[in-house]
Image: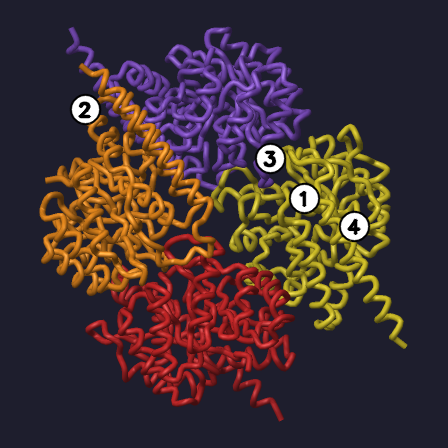
Chain colours: A orange, B red, C purple, D yellow
Amino acid sequence: MTLSGIWTPTLVPLNDRGQVNEPELRRFIDWLIEAGVQGLFPNGSTGEFIRFTSEERRWIAAITCDQAMGRVPVIVGCAEASIKETLNASEAYRAMGARAAAVIAPFYYPLSSSSIYEYFRQLGEASTIDVMLYNMPRFANPIDIETVQRLSSLQRIVGIKDSSGDLTFMMRMIQSISPLRHDFAFLTGWDSQVVAMLLAGATGGVNATSNVAPQLIRKLYDLTLKGNLEEAHRLQHVVTRLFDLMFQGHNFPDGFRAGVETRGFNFGSGRQPTGLPMPDPKVLAMKAEIAKILDDEAKYESRITRHDP
Amino acid sequence: MTLSGIWTPTLVPLNDRGQVNEPELRRFIDWLIEAGVQGLFPNGSTGEFIRFTSEERRWIAAITCDQAMGRVPVIVGCAEASIKETLNASEAYRAMGARAAAVIAPFYYPLSSSSIYEYFRQLGEASTIDVMLYNMPRFANPIDIETVQRLSSLQRIVGIKDSSGDLTFMMRMIQSISPLRHDFAFLTGWDSQVVAMLLAGATGGVNATSNVAPQLIRKLYDLTLKGNLEEAHRLQHVVTRLFDLMFQGHNFPDGFRAGVETRGFNFGSGRQPTGLPMPDPKVLAMKAEIAKILDDEAKYESRITRHDP
Amino acid sequence: MTLSGIWTPTLVPLNDRGQVNEPELRRFIDWLIEAGVQGLFPNGSTGEFIRFTSEERRWIAAITCDQAMGRVPVIVGCAEASIKETLNASEAYRAMGARAAAVIAPFYYPLSSSSIYEYFRQLGEASTIDVMLYNMPRFANPIDIETVQRLSSLQRIVGIKDSSGDLTFMMRMIQSISPLRHDFAFLTGWDSQVVAMLLAGATGGVNATSNVAPQLIRKLYDLTLKGNLEEAHRLQHVVTRLFDLMFQGHNFPDGFRAGVETRGFNFGSGRQPTGLPMPDPKVLAMKAEIAKILDDEAKYESRITRHDP
Amino acid sequence: MTLSGIWTPTLVPLNDRGQVNEPELRRFIDWLIEAGVQGLFPNGSTGEFIRFTSEERRWIAAITCDQAMGRVPVIVGCAEASIKETLNASEAYRAMGARAAAVIAPFYYPLSSSSIYEYFRQLGEASTIDVMLYNMPRFANPIDIETVQRLSSLQRIVGIKDSSGDLTFMMRMIQSISPLRHDFAFLTGWDSQVVAMLLAGATGGVNATSNVAPQLIRKLYDLTLKGNLEEAHRLQHVVTRLFDLMFQGHNFPDGFRAGVETRGFNFGSGRQPTGLPMPDPKVLAMKAEIAKILDDEAKYESRITRHDP
């Protein structure tokens, strides 16, 4: 079945010693699932995968799969040093019950398309778990459409998470692949265009903002699928405001780490120091604005609901 | 004493199973030292650090330090997931007898200058071994001059390897730091401008091309220091031709991996697949051209030497 | 009244001596209007404004306004050397009966936002004709949202043609300006996202592809406004295929110049030489593909229509 | 004879009505020539060519050629709409006594190398005056080395002004062209690397900073040619400080316009408004710093000279 719906690329709470805060992570996962997210996506860019060791990444994946308890599927991101290490990690994720492994395109060194294709081809042929391509051209080598199309002939490769933010790219990609592979999943990672991406044929989203406002994005998704575009666009603007607040002017994903604290969680300091005063007045102002937006939205909702017969 | 001279950012030979080929690496290190390089720099970008696990990187460092046997100093590159892991690794390198640890600026996520400063500050204050900043703006976050200047006040931070290839950047940096910290090292990683960088005040180079032509670059260095600029510039053009051949049109550092094989070493396939036929006709042509350039240069040398009284 | 609908950024036919081919331009304008375009936009990027002299630009504008004969409005692009020259040109366009002057942001030299704001502010305050901002960040300085918002307080500035191709940018811009200025026009210049831009609140499009397929884009516009999104998206894919064929792999707007010849017009060679053989086999193949796409679409249309009662 | 030496890309003083201030321009030209610049280069990027009309550009060229009175040669920049207009303009410059016409690569539209080659080829074959290529990749299409090499076979094309600031590019270019065309001129437009460029084989410089400190740059040039590298590098640092002050943090070339006023000239406001308060405190501080640098340098000089026997 095609992967679809709203997935949360989960942030990782840290304790005072900078280690994974397991109890808080479990509490956070419960909250997300109860709020309606349709899948969990640990160890993505939002989850700061490359700032954890291989062992820590497995630990995060294990907690997530365990706590999800089958209520929602889990796709685990991979950021290992080589194909062999990636296969080892994804085999471990399979054993934990993950639905798929999402593999970022190689980063740091710029690579040719043929090299990127070959990397994923070897993974796709050897993996014992479904593989999702992870296109994040801001941070890693881009995966071009021809490469995705070629890779879509491998049954183990079941979809792409695309964080390019380029609607035309998504549309061209869907046009070139869907006719050949009906069950291929297209998940958008660009929170400010979820409605447009879904209308253009994307099957879902993996959206950092859903760490902070899971209900809102889930609702936006449902409204779009029902064709209630006016209300969907209204919510899209709310989501974009939240996204912009947390994305712009911060080292990614620090703004989202701060944002999730407005929902009653204690995420601690990130691993990459900011060099800014703590608490940072700019962050405090952002948190206040997020709280206000969410409060306004809640009031709007209750007003609408009250008037419904 | 200020770090200076020509350092080789050593490539790593792999065996048929894709593992570090220890005997060949030891043979290669001997060859480099005998050819005149003044230091070894394992686990840099040329050494494909991020394609090895933490354990493999320590193994590569251990072989290198052991084989160098104090004949030349060793600076070991770091590419760990966090400050804590970097400190652990560099402590291990200290125990192996390394002269310093070179730490790449954080990559993947774009970061503010204040965050990059704080990262290196924490390292510089806690490290038990000298630290070299590693600026590689093509692949990682750039380290700006103000940040280098601020960091140069920490005694453990002893220099920078700069691979920006921007002569003006190097000159501005030297101008702003040397008056405050006389022993700070400035090593250029841009092989096509070694002469100009040395004339502008750089104290040495960490040059990928020295994996293939160590004598040539060492000679270029000596000539520049002696003020024989005409001959130095002639050699610079030879080095640039070699550098361009191996840098352009290949995924870095694959061209250099191929190049070193022209010197009688067996480096095996790299870890990142190329998706190209093996042997690749383009690579074969490149190897032939490298061999010809080195042969022409050897003939030129022997002709000159014969005419010397 | 807010500027809306589909506008054609008209290409300019040249004769054998490289001069404006007036009879062909008049014939082309008639064809476009009969095909349903709702406005003409001479002297834009597609119209190669900067490759004509000031005098030629006025001549092109005069022919266009004269031939339109009030059937559709005309917005004339400006690319003069200075504010004073731009005001002179736009006054001339006013006298010709143009609806507005579209002014590209200054190009060549990168400029600060405050400088761009001040440029348009002086124009907006002194102009005797309505002014449309022209945002083309691929070729000229970008106009940021805050600048557009500040400028929207000037009554003479009536809208923006945005060719960024960034749906999020368009949505943020509409969100920040529409509440303050209800009649502000938002025309998208990104042909592959017209449906999404209209759904997000854009009031129309200025689309290079409408030089070649005016009926198609007009129909896409009407379908979107009527809410027939399935058929609109189908047409969007056809338009994107045409756009990609003419945009990618050619010097812009040469692909569009060639494309329009498939509709029975003789546009001659462009002013910027290509250095390619004439006829270029790649261009011939592109023309054949455009003809086939348009033919397929015509057959599809007639099949649908036949089945309609 | 190969074009060489230090050329000034002259700024244009404007009067209160925004028109060319002829008396001040004549006074400025006299001052530059007396200060030792070896050529004048009106209508370049520093001279804001695209902000003047064709007629104004001719007027600026005419004043410059007339006032130079043969004391130094004049190369006039071209920024016309088409090849035909460029030929007309360069013929006019020939009649004024200009030594050559410098033609910027086409800008605004990105172009293929073959198109850029063909553009210059047609100019080179039809021109009645020597042509200098003008490579300014920050603002216009880059001219690649293969294109320069192919064009160097045309006798009318006598050199290149390269403002890439990339020393390796300059070295590769000289290596590939000098053996085929001994008299080809290589003038660098990157003020912070004049010494290194000259050592690498450049024949001279066209340097914006020479509008403000003509004697300094001329002296730097003479010292480099004499092999006094220590003093040349000392002056290079002074020039770089001046260049950075005027280049960074301002819309180019506004910093240089302000800088020249410290030498006793009245250049008026530029044509592109800044949107900043007048006088801008940042500009006043910059002017004070320039004056101090020049004053310190004068004191240093007189101290040195006094001690000379």
Seen from the viewer's position, the closer of residues D58 and D191 is D191
| Front of the two marks 1 and 4 | 1
| Front of the two marks 1 and 3 | 3
Eyeballing the image, is B159 above or below A187? below
| Front of the two marks 1 and 2 | 2
Quarter assignment of residue B273: bottom left
Q: If the image is split into quadrants, where does the C terminus of chain B sit?
A: bottom right
Distance from Cα at disc 1 to Cα at disc 4: 23 Å
Dot 2: what SS? helix
Eyeballing the image, is C28 above or below B73? above
Percent from the top left, x then y, of residue D72? 81, 51
Q: Amino acid at mark 4?
A: Pro
Seen from the viewer's position, the closer of residues B43 and A291 is A291
Q: Amino acid at mark 3?
A: Ser
Residue at mark 1 shares a chain with residue at mark 2: no
Seen from the viewer's position, the closer of residues D295 and C268 is D295
Q: Which residue is mark 1?
A: D253
Q: Amino acid at mark 1?
A: Pro
Seen from the viewer's position, the closer of residues D237 and B156 is B156
Q: Residue at x 49, y 11 (%)?
A: C73
**Numbered disc 2: what chain?**
A
Q: Which residue is mark 3?
A: C114
Residue at mark 1 shares a chain with residue at mark 4: yes
| Front of the two marks 3 and 4 | 3
> Which dot marks residue D73?
4
Quarter assignment of residue B107: bottom left
Residue at mark 2 shares a chain with residue at mark 3: no
**Numbered disc 1: what chain?**
D
> Which dot marks residue A226?
2
**Numbered disc 3: what chain?**
C
